[in-house]
Image: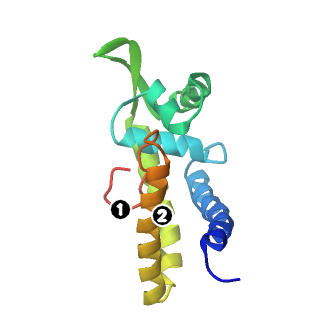
Amino acid sequence: MSWNAERATQELLQVLPALNRVIAGEVRAVAGDETTMAQFRVLAWCADGPQTLSTLARWRRVSLQAMSSLVQGLVERGWIARTPDPSDRRQQLLALTAAGEAHYRAAQARILARLRPLLAALAPAELAAVEQALAALGRVFTQADDGAAPPAPALAEGRAR
């Protein structure tokens, strides 16, 4: 079978679950088996600054009730704090606590440490191909996302997300 959009789609669907398992394993290793990828994403989005529940629900494409439940678990762990939104009394802002920031940074560091040697094992030409492919995939997936969600939390060192 020649390389085309159909084959690329099939291969992408084969690789992404493995990548997600590696990332999820590192997230859980930092705080235990109860930490989910959805919780990690919320922490990543809040690392950029306080967010409202409705914004987070829209980004995750879930109901307010579902997001409220997810956030409540993060509040109970002491990773997220709720504060009144000064611009809208009906809203609360959700922000990382110091413990939430530390947890997020520790998980991000573990993920980077796990992925870095895997990518370092690629030949220079393969690494260049990954760079080109990621740029292209980022472009088409961002366009297809219809603006509902911000870019995925980055795993690059020194970046907030």
Residue at position x 40%, y 38% in the image: 46
Residue at position x 37%, y 42% in the image: 47
Residue type, numbered disc 1: Glu
Q: Is residue 109 left or right of residue 114?
A: left
Which residue ends up furthest to the top in the rendered image?
Answer: 89
Q: Residues within 10 Å of mark 1 (few under 14, many from 20)?
A: few
Residue at position x 57%, y 29% in the image: 67
Q: Residues within 10 Å of mark 2 (few under 14, many from 20)?
A: few
**x, y (%) of residue 134?**
45, 68
The CA span between labels 2 and 1 is: 21 Å
Q: Which mark is residue 67?
A: none
Residue at position x 48%, y 64% in the image: 137
**x, y (%) of residue 32?**
63, 48
Residue type, numbered disc 2: Leu
Of badges 2 and 1, the one in the foreground is: 2
From what the image shows, is residue 57 above or below residue 33?
above
Q: Nearer the viewer, residue 12 or 43?
A: 12
Answer with the quarter of the image where residue 95 lies.
Answer: top left
* Residue with the mark numbered 1: 157
Q: Which mark is residue 137?
A: 2
**x, y (%) of residue 61?**
56, 35
**x, y (%) of residue 79?**
47, 35
Q: Is residue 13 visible to us here? A: yes
